[in-house]
Amino acid sequence: MAQISCPQCRSATPRAGFGFLKIAVAILFFPIGLLILLTGRKPTACRQCNFLFTT
Ligand SMILES: [Zn+2]
C-alpha cells in the first residue's frame, strides 16, 4: 500500500481512500465500482497523532 508522511508529525502512515479492497470492488462492479472509488475517499488519519488530512 502507498504510504504518505503526516504533515504534522512526519511519520509514515497508510494512505486512506484507495485500499486494495476498494480497487477490487471497482473492478468487479465496473463501471459502478468507479463511482464507489470516487465517492469513497476519506481523509487520512495519522496513526501516530490522529491528525486528519486529505491527500
Ligand atoms: Zn501525525
Image: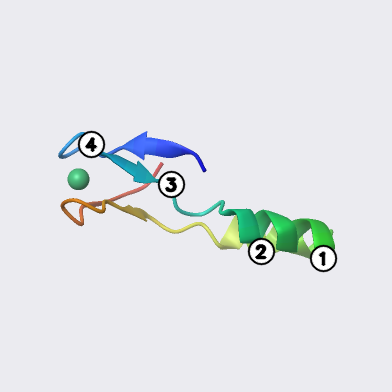
The residue that mark 1 highlights is 29
Residue under the image location 73 percent in, 63 percent down: 25
Marked residue nearer the N-terminal end (1 or 2): 1
Compared across the picture, whether 6 is left or right of 2 comes to left
Q: Is residue 27 visible?
A: yes
Please name the amino acid that badge 1 sits on: Phe
Compared across the picture, whether 52 is left or right of 1 comes to left
Please name the amino acid that badge 4 sits on: Pro
The residue that mark 2 highlights is 36
Question: Which marked residue is nearer to the observer: mark 1 or mark 2?
Answer: 1
Q: Are marks 1 and 4 in contact (CB under 8 Å)?
A: no
The image quadrant where one finds the C terminus is top left
The residue that mark 3 highlights is 15
- Number of marks: 4
Compared across the picture, whether 30 is left or right of 10 comes to right
Marked residue nearer the N-terminal end (4 or 2): 4
Marked residue nearer the N-terminal end (3 or 2): 3
Please give the label number shown on residue 7: 4
Q: Are marks 1 and 2 in contact (CB under 8 Å)?
A: yes
Which of the two residues, 19 or 41, is positioned nearer the viewer here?
A: 19
Question: Which marked residue is nearer to the observer: mark 3 or mark 2?
Answer: 3
Please name the amino acid that badge 2 sits on: Ile
Q: Secondary structure at mark 4?
A: loop
